[in-house]
Image (cartoon, rainbow, N blue to C red):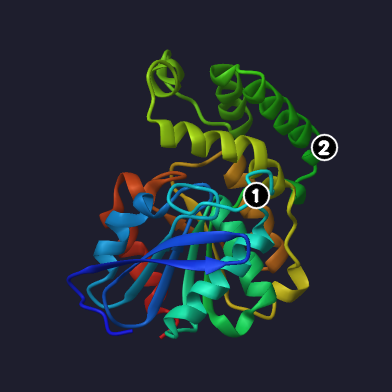
Amino acid sequence: MTLDSSATTVQTLRVDGARLHYEVRGQGPLVALVGAPMAAAGFAALADLLATDHTVLTTDPRGIGRSPVDDPEQDSTPPLRAADLSRLIAELDAGPAIVLGSSGGACTALALAQTRPEQVRLTIAHEPPLDGLLDDRDELHRATEEMIARYLAGDVIGAWRLFMATAGIRLPEGALEQMFGGERDPQAVADELRWFGHELRETVHWRPDVAALRGTEVVVGIGEASAGQLCDRTSRALAEALDVEPVAFPGGHTGFAEDPEPFAIRLRAVLAGIR
């Protein structure tokens, strides 16, 4: 595939049980930016910054946004999403890839590294929600079940309130009502329902194969503003299990989207260390 570094190529790929929307920018070594449930749009600004000297792949994960699934009742697991990412990397024929996964996408990236290590040059796992690595995993899993139950029962604000409390994320008074109340974009609501109903549980319950990952190059990223939050704890647990030092990235859990320029600078410093 010949790519114009100034353009974004938008395509779809048919995989088992889904049709994946994906976007490609730039030229150079392949970097995949992966979220779950975050779609390609959330990485657009960072992708533009990296595309000056990289081929950058972004995608809507199966069941989210522009990537419909054949069976809406199928759960989205990190290994299933990793198989999708493997197909996309093979389709581009530009690997092995540097894979930056954030949140649930970090679980996807880790699952790919441990099952298809030949396709991955470096895995950057930015704040993976690996609740199973923590001592209080049972309490966290109970909270997950409660927030899912609240959401599916129609208590959207209550579900998000419990989610934020469990994640250790503090928001201003009234922020939840402003973010998740009133008239909302139908696609955002559909993606949210998909996430609560078929993705959240499978992602936070997933446990990586630490022995397999030790044979690969893994950087564990933590947002500088995430101190004390749940994903700070899970990321540090992963780093300890892998016997690596975590790397601080600017911003918080979604720093790459909220202020992508300093995030890109730190990411380039990490990439410079593997060349």
Q: Amino acid at mark 1?
A: Asp
How far from the left and from the top, in percent, is residue 205?
74, 47
Name the N-terminal-most of marks 2 and 1. Answer: 1
Q: How many marks?
A: 2
Left or right, residue 41 beside residue 111: left
Q: Quadrant of residue 46?
A: bottom left
Which image quarter is the N terminus in?
Answer: bottom left
Horizontal and vertical percent for residue 62?
Answer: 55, 55
Q: Is residue 144 left or right of residue 263?
A: right
Judging by the rendered image, the residue that carries numbered circle 1 is 71
Tell me the quarter of the picture where residue 160 sits: top right
Q: Answer yes or no: is residue 229 visible.
A: no
Where 275 falls versus 108 (above or below)? below
Instruction: Give the residue type at disc 2.
Output: Asp
- Residue 212 point in image, percent of width and height: 74, 75
The quarter of the rendered structure image containing the C terminus is: bottom left
Front residue of this view, candidates 245 and 96:
96
Helix, strand or loop at disc 1?
A: loop
Tell which tag, 2 or 1, sits nearer the viewer: 1
The local secondary structure at tag 2 comes to helix
* Alpha carbon distance from label 2 to label 1: 30 Å
Is residue 176 placed above or below 22 in the rendered structure? above
Note whether 45 is above or below 149 in the view shown.
Answer: below
Residue plotted at (72% across, 29% down): 143
What number is the disc on residue 138? 2
